[in-house]
Amino acid sequence: MLVCPESQTSGQQRIEDYGKQGVNIVGRPLEVVGSAAKGTRKGVGLDIPIQKCIKSDIDYLAHPNAIPYFEGINFPGIDKGGIIPGLSNPYLGPSVRFEPFSLPTFHPFIPFGS
């Protein structure tokens, strides 16, 4: 596993900072998937609401049993539905995993059949 390579950009740095703070507070892991994990979010830095094709949200995943622990913590760019119950799948796309009191780790996409 690698330390998240996208942490150099300001938008990614903000996600990393909030992710680390959130998991340190509740003591449970959290994952970021989708365009945020790829470093391809649309509209980063725009002061507009999240809108399809203009500004993308950030998809946060947590184990279903851990979701109640995250209640009341506001993560940047989170979708209206909140934290998604589940775990990432490297065959569907990359993810960034936040563990309590650890550096975030980047898990790359693994093409099926490789």
Image (spheres, grey):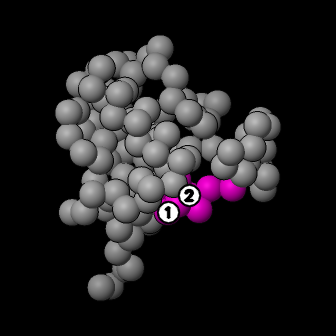
Q: Label 1 belongs to which residue? A: 38
Rendered location of residue 82, percent (x, y): 54, 30
Question: How far across and how far down the image is residue 58, in percent?
Answer: 56, 44
Say the numbered circle drawn on residue 11: none
Q: Give amino acid for label 2.
A: Ser
Looking at the image, residue 38 lies above or below residue 7: below
Left or right of 68 on screen, residue 114: left
Give amino acid for label 1: Lys
Identity of the residue furthest to the top in this view = 72
Span shown in magenta:
34-42
The reply, left or right, for residue 13 in relation to residue 45 is left
Dividing the picture into quarters, in which one does residue 6 lie?
A: bottom left
Point 49% across, 49% down: residue: 12
**Residue 89 in view (yes/no):** no
What residue lies at 32% left-to-right and 85% top-to-bottom?
Answer: 113
* Picture layout, residue 63 above or below residue 27: below
User: Residue 11 at what x, y percent from top left?
Assistant: 55, 47
Place of residue 14 in the rendered image (x, y in percent of width and height, measured from the top left): 49, 40
CB atoms at circles 2 and 1 under 8 Å apart? yes
**Residue located beneath label 2 in the image:** 35
Residue 79 falls in image quadrant: top right
Give me the C-alpha separation between circle 2 and circle 1.
Answer: 5 Å
Residue 46 seen by the camera? yes
